Amino acid sequence: MRPSPDPAGIDALDLLDPELHATHDLTPVWRWLRAHDPVRRHERFWSVTRHADVLRVVRDPETFSSLRGNMLRTLLRGHDPGAGKMLVVTDGPRHARLRRLLTPGFGPRTLGTVTRSIEEATRDLLGALVRRGGGDFVAEVAAQVPLRAICELLGVPEADRQRVLELTGEAMLGETPAAERAGRTPPTAMIAQSEILLYYTRLAARRRTAPGDDVISLLVGSDLTEEEVLLNCYNLIIGGDETARLAMAGGLLALATYDKEWARLREDPALVDPAVEEILRWTTPAAHVGRVATRDAQLAGRRVAAGDAVALWTVSANRDEAVFDDPDRFDVGRTPNRHLTFGHGPHFCLGAQLARAELRALLAELRASVSAITVTGPVTWLPSNFVNGVGTLPVALA
Ligand code: HEM
């Protein structure tokens, strides 16, 4: 259990500090902000913590734009390298066009194939962990499944999978909280990033002449430039890898911690779907989404000026007592569950159904082959103000 800071000392808390998020449970701080200062001015940005205000902002992209970035890290730097080209950091008609282009890649046919592959991978990886009696669930299961799903989605041929998985894992080290903290990308990650971009450039060239029914074929079949094709592949990798990993690992941790909820879920298969939603609410792997005001706006009585950066703390909105009964209780039967884990509005997560399929496969496999989940060692939390969750989760599964 991480300690919680006393909200009375809120003026001294730096919500940008990655370590604060790793070492503290900020639940009481968010509760205090929702009650007393729901749209709070910090030196360089605003914090929005209520569910209703988060919704107001994400529903109004003309006033609150994604073009300068969608997380504090890029917003405070002043630019995002993918701005105007990568789905999540585009706005308006350009965003709508890109989204229309990518959406069929997440349709029922592709999802059916990807889901089968997720189920198979989950069964194999979890089975191996159970046979060994336990291990680090993050490294051995949660880090593997989402990357495999993305390879499937992008149409990476079977023969290239292993190499691509390794390279992507190394490349992602440049996106980790440790790199965020150090303010630089480790050289090995930079090399892997170049190699992976080169790989996707070649794959895209192959798909131009021999298209398949994968996302890369959709992208190269359009009038996007090569750079735009690559950036949007990259969007899927960074959008769908770590987030899904954190939801899976945080979900397992919640079931280990609240064993009565795990017992309920084991007994009643009808609880799988609500449990997936509750895990998504409880874990909130993207702690905030960010926007920049394009013009002056009023928000909960505060005047946000044009050019101001705004952090929408979904991690707080998902515990808003105005929307959720007993919000600090993990309840696998919670319905309705209007969590904002996938955002809302035009940028609502394109991979939401895929992430749900990953969690559903995990719960189904746990129900089928595990009766007791025990945390066996120290759990570490990631030092980041953006990705929210555990970096290691040693468990015994019996
Ligand atoms: C957008 C969270 C899984 C791809 C988003 C947004 C959030 C989010 C909060 C909205 C960003 C914004 O409003 O600025 C999550 C979480 C996931 C997850 C918590 C797992 C539990 C995935 C997966 C994929 C994916 C598996 C694909 C492989 C995307 C894309 C967008 C997006 C492409 C941009 C959509 C747009 O701008 O129209 N995600 N995501 N995500 N996500 Fe996810």
Image (tube, rainbow, N blue to C red):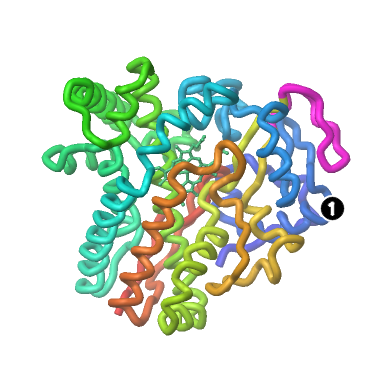
Q: Position of residue 273 (x, y in %)?
A: 47, 67
Give the tally of numbered discs. Answer: 1
Give the residue displayed 84% in from the left and 34% down from the top.
298
Q: Is residue 157 above or below residue 395?
A: above
Q: Is residue 83 above or below residue 177?
A: above
Give the residue displayed 39% in from the left and 28% down from the top.
232
Q: Position of residue 132 (x, y in %)?
A: 21, 71
Residue farthest to the left? 159
Q: Is residue 10 left or right of residue 169?
A: right
Q: Which residue is nearer to you in this view: 349 or 134?
A: 349
Crowdedness near tag 1: few (<14), some (14–19) or many (≥20) residues, C-alpha within 10 Å:
few
- Tell me the quarter of the image containing the C terminus: bottom left
Q: Which residue is nearer to you in this view: 315 or 53?
A: 53
Give the residue displayed 39% in from the left and 25% down from the top.
231
Q: Is residue 304 magenta?
A: yes
Q: Magenta part of the protein: which range?
A: 294-309
Task: Return the residue at label 1.
Answer: 36
Q: Is residue 234 magenta?
A: no
Residue farthest to the right? 301
- Tell me the quarter of the image containing the N terminus: bottom right
Q: Is residue 115 above or below residue 47?
A: below
Give the residue displayed 22% in from the left and 33% down from the top.
212
Amino acid type, callout 1: His
Q: Position of residue 185 (x, y in %)?
A: 39, 30
Q: Is residue 80 above or below residue 225?
A: below
